[in-house]
Image: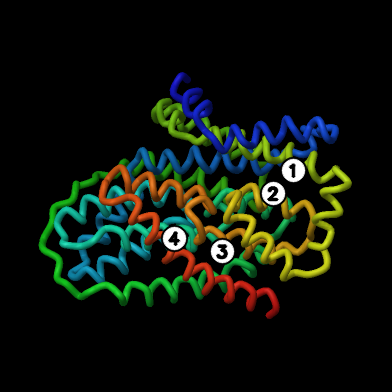
Amino acid sequence: MAVIFKKIASDKVLLIAFVAAIITSFLSAPHIIQDINWHMIGSLLSMMLLVQVYEYLDFLEYIATELSIKAKTVRQLMVVIVCLSFFGAMVLTNDITILTMIPLFHKMAKHLKINPVMPVILIAVSSNLGSIFTPFGNAHNLYVLSHYNLSITQFFKMSAPISIISFVVLLLLTMTFPKQEIQARELKKIVLNKPALAITFAITILFFLSIFSFIPIWIPLIFSIVWTLLLNYHVTEAVDYALLLTFMCFGVAVGNASRIPEVVQLFKFLEKDPMSIYLTSLITSQFMSNVPTTILVSQFTKDVTAVFLGTNLAGIGTVISSMANLLTFKQYNFFFKVKPLRFLVTFFVVDLLLLILFGVIGAFLIYI
């Protein structure tokens, strides 16, 4: 418990959200029960528990290892890394994919003469773009799904086109890497606990069913909690409870703000023009991250596509536009320790160019 409280107390984003909730509560009467999206909170907690179980069971690392040993050249290796990051983020979220892929790449990079900057950036970009496809790829997708009460068809109608385009662009980016042959390398042999994975898969299916309201969210949540405690109660310590509290605080803050007349007038223009919604979501996320931006903007518009595309594509912007980007920098600095300032500059330039490209693509998708 001490570990959990220490992580919560040191989370600066949570502190900002908490202060915002307190300040706005003086400006508008809080409606805590109504303003917090409890279905989304339950979904997020269940998802994070399952993700940590998969991490504990070495499932993603097993898949990554088995596929990466088949790569013969640096270019092939980058194709594998992009695919693992892109498709892994669809299921295990962009954050967990980054936390898994960068350490794995660090192990492989020891046997390669390759600058780690671009591969690490590509892992981050692939994870952010891949996470767009599913509701559980990132936290604010769960919020959008629940807030707008979307069906399976409605959600994937929004996410599929941009995901297909993103994957094509990522594959083109891998063509910039050389066809340098890779020397034989040794990776840790992983033995999977198949019975434990089978149970985890079954609970995951229940989770998927609850996401689209086929069953109540409390069913997979209870199974997730009990199964995690039975496996190893220490696994629960790795869950980002600060993120849950951040969502709750932002929910209260945004709910309060949405009842302040001046704020309502300020955002009223969003209801008239999908492009203004899209650009507001895209730009605001660069300075306050895409999660709180999603919660804020969604209060003032019913145009879910503009909010969805704007906040999701914003993830390939600045280092603070997505929590996954901050994790990328922390991971790079921890494992590689090679000129972190140069990494940040390169990250900014590459992501800015990609943000412009995908920003144009997103604007086009809104009007088709």
| Residue density around tag 2, few if under 14, some if 14–19, many if 20 or more, within 10 Å | many
Mark 3 lies on residue: 313
Q: How is the image coloured?
A: rainbow
Mark 4 lies on residue: 348
* Of residues 358 and 26, the one drawn nearer to the viewer in this rendering: 26
> N-terminal of the two: label 4 or label 3?
3
Position in image of residue 164 (x %, y %): 50, 73
Q: Quadrant of the C terminus?
A: bottom right
Residue 254, disc: 1
> N-terminal of the two: label 3 or label 2?
2
Which amino acid, by three-letter code, is at mark 1?
Val
- State the CA–CA distance, disc 2 to disc 1: 7 Å
- State the CA–CA distance, disc 4 to disc 3: 15 Å
> N-terminal of the two: label 2 or label 4?
2
User: SS of the residue at dot 1?
Assistant: helix
User: SS of the residue at dot 2?
Assistant: helix
User: SS of the residue at dot 4?
Assistant: helix
Q: Residue at x 31, y 41 (%)?
A: 193
Residue 295, disc: 2
Instruction: Name which quarter of the figure residue 364 lies in.
Output: bottom right
Instruction: Name which quarter of the figure residue 277 lies in.
Output: bottom right
Position in image of residue 137 (x %, y %): 52, 54
Is residue 87 visible in the rendered image? The answer is no
Report the residue that reaches farthest toward the top. 2
